[in-house]
Structures are given as C-alpha cells and as structure tokens.
Amino acid sequence: MAEGILRHLAGDRFEVCSAGAAPASVRPEAVEALRETGIDISLHRSKHVDEFKGQTFDYVLTVCDHARDVCPVYPGQGTRIHHNLEDPAAAPGGAEERLNAFRRVRDQITAYFQTADPFARR
C-alpha cells in the first residue's frame, strides 16, 4: 500500500520501489482499500529486498519494526525513515474487519506521507 500511495502523492518527483523481507501476494483488501481512494495497485506484485541488491537509494522507508530490523543496508544508502504501523494482514475477524484494518492503515500511511518531510507536497 505504501508504494501505491507514495507513487500517487509524489507523481514524478520520486521513483518509488518497494520490497519486503518475506513478500507474499498483494492482498485483495489492500487493492480494495486503495481502489476506494482512486489508486490502482491491482497489477502490483510483492518483491523481495534481494531484487534491489546493489542499487542505491536516496531514501529507504520502513513501515514496521520487523522491516526496520531486517532491512538490508544498501550501498550509498541515503536517509533511512521509519514509521511503525500495524500489520493489517494480521487483523483478526471477518472480511469487513480485515478490510477496515487495511483502510485504517491506508489512512495512516497517507497522513504520514502528506506531512513527513521530504514527502510533503510543496
């Protein structure tokens, strides 16, 4: 979700890549939660951090403590930015409760990117 939201907010100001330490399929709840705001991530795929081995980044963002702890150090790595969010995929309950968890995290990510320097719109 963070990739889709940042691509949407940043436009062409940033090249956005995302990956995880244990990637899985893109959750349908994530697709639906972002679709509700006009962002389409239906063609996104989960990638492993190893796919970006050897690349340099100006910023490396982590959105949970586990990712922060296992995220590799990239050569020439710029600024690391961390913001711990709940894992909506781990939310208990039925389909509506899980979708609400994804909506909640969607809104948290959006608010964070809209206010966090260097991502705030200028």
Image: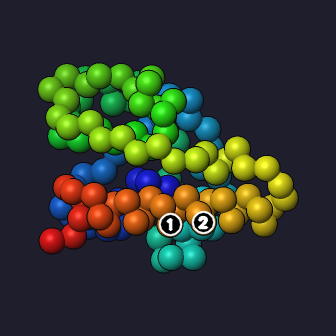
Q: Where is residue 99 shown, x and y percent of the image? A: 70, 63
Q: Position of residue 1 (x, y in %)?
A: 49, 56
Q: Position of residue 101 (x, y in %)?
A: 66, 59
Three-letter code for the amino acid on which mark 1 is drawn? Asp
Please tell me which residue is depicted at 17% across the width and 34% down the height of the picture: 78
Label 1, on which residue? Answer: 107
The answer to which of 105 and 11 lies nearer the viewer is: 105
Residue at image position (56%, 35%) is: 23
At a point 15% along the width and 71% down the height, the residue shown is 122
In the image: residue 27, left or right of residue 119: right
Task: Confirm or deny contact between disc 1 and disc 2 (CB under 8 A).
Answer: yes
Return the x and y of residue 114 as percentages of the image width and height.
Answer: 32, 66
Residue 48 in the image: above or below residue 58: above
For the question of whether residue 47 can be seen, the reply is no
In what element is the residue under mark 2?
Answer: helix
Query: Which residue position holds label 2?
Result: 103
Is residue 82 left or right of 107 when viewed as pictured?
left
Q: Is residue 122 visible?
A: yes
Colour mapping: rainbow
Q: CA distance from mark 1 to mark 2?
A: 6 Å
Disc 1: CA contacts within 10 A as few (<14), some (14-19) or many (>=20): some
